[in-house]
Amino acid sequence: MNAPETLAVIICAGLVTYATRLGGVWLVRRVRLGPRATAALEAVPGATLAAIIAPGVIAGPAEAAAAALTFALARRVPAVAAIAAGLITVVVLRRWLG
Amino acid sequence: MTVDVRKSAPQGTKRRGRGEVLHGMVDILPLTLGTLPFALLLGSVGVGAGLSPAEVALMSAVVFAGSSQFVAVGLWGTGAGGVVIVASVMLVNLRHLLLGAALAPYVHAYPMRRLAPALFLLTDEVWALAMRRGRGQALTLAYWFGLGSTMYLGWLAGTVAGCQIGARLGDTRAWGLDFAITAVFVCLLAGFWHGRRAALPWLASAGVAVAVYRLGAGGTWHILAGGLVGAAVGALQAGGAAPANGDSPR
């Protein structure tokens, strides 16, 4: 991607993000979201994250093991510690598994 | 259809304004420090993905939404197209709609033209503290600005510093940093966990994403496909439990 295109993508990403920030308050002042629409919206961020990481997680045994460990730790220790453990695991396992 | 909005802001706002800003700044300082490692990491992986420090800083300045910025940077590293990057950023940030919807009753006194600039500073952390404030006393825009501006400056400074670190690291794979984005997302995902019901849209999304990824020969449309399927599964889950008048607006 060349520099002007990169710039345009960053600006557009900023604009759509601002729209999501305005949207919630704006929407509530006009329409009431039903439980079904709310549930769909609630599911989107997690589902998007799952879709993003899925190919990377199953890329190899080192990545899969590190991801599983990070997930298990993330609900018990601060995120920074869980991420550090994941990184160390992936580096060690990659070296160990070849 | 217009909604009746009271014209008066909470009383005494002007005189207490400066104190309110300061209260907001102090309240959010610990959370701002907590996001610093992520800002540093974002800066270093951003430079690793081939963006210039100025571009990474600009992204923090105009997007100012951590998880979606990690998404964007990760996609940049894979050579994804601009449309996919912007669409993915929007999908990850759709949760702002829910935050805004929950916030709305506490800022009812302010007209939209005053709220619009303030809402640029909406993040998970700012929202959480604003909601806490709103339950106990009047939530003023001054307090909101104190929260948001501190978070904004901290995030921007952390990202810029992270770019400098990233430029000195060299081969990011040797440090496992190519896995860092996945690790950050795994943590974010764990944060969205609220019982097994949450996992069903994720599994559906992940399954569809892997299938599309394999069929599409490494494209990035698997993210949109997964996100949409996940939303559909979420809606179906609610459909089973909700009353019949479920999705009619108003």
Image (tube, grey):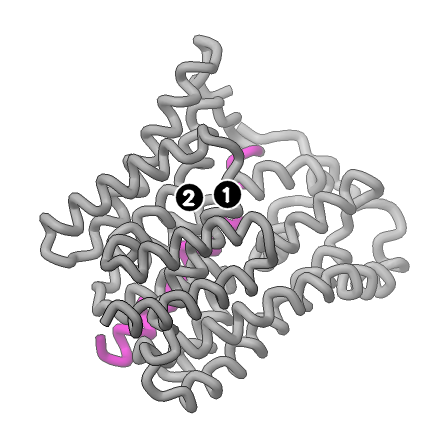
**Residue closer to the observer: B162 or B18:** B162
Q: Chain of mark 2?
A: A
Q: Left of A27 or right of it: where is B145?
A: right
Residue at x 46%, y 11% (from the top left corner): B245
Outermost residue toward the top? B244
Quarter holding residue A14: bottom left
- Which image quadrant: the C terminus of chain A? bottom left
User: Which label was assigned to residue B192?
Assistant: 1
Asked if labels 1 and 2 touch by Cβ distance under 8 angstroms, the answer is yes
**Residue closer to the observer: B222 or B100:** B222
Residue at x 43%, y 28% (from the top left corner): A37
Whether residue B116 appears in this view of the structure is: no
Q: What kind of secondary structure does the magenta stretch mostly adopt?
A: helix
Q: Left of B109 or right of it: where is B80?
A: left
Residue B250 located within the stretch drawn in magenta: no
Compared with residue B76, is residue A67 higher up or lower down, i.e. above or below?
Answer: above
Residue A22 located within the stretch drawn in magenta: yes
Residue A80 in the image: state x and y as whole percent: 55, 64
Compared with residue B107, is residue B184 higher up or lower down, i.e. above or below?
Answer: below
Q: Are marks 2 and 1 on the same chain?
A: no
Q: Whole-Å distance between the Cαs marked 2 and 1?
A: 6 Å
The amino acid sitting under disc 2 is: Gly
Stretch of the chain drawn in magenta: A1-28
Compared with residue A5, is residue A66 higher up or lower down, i.e. above or below?
Answer: above
Quarter holding residue A92: bottom left
Q: Left of A47 or right of it: where is B18?
A: right
Q: Which residue is mark 2?
A: A46
Q: Residues within 10 Å of mark 1 (few under 14, many from 20)?
A: some
Q: Secondary structure at mark 1?
A: loop
Residue at x 51%, y 36% (from the top left corner): A27
Q: Residues within 10 Å of mark 2 (few under 14, many from 20)?
A: many
Residue A15 in the image: state x and y as whole percent: 42, 59
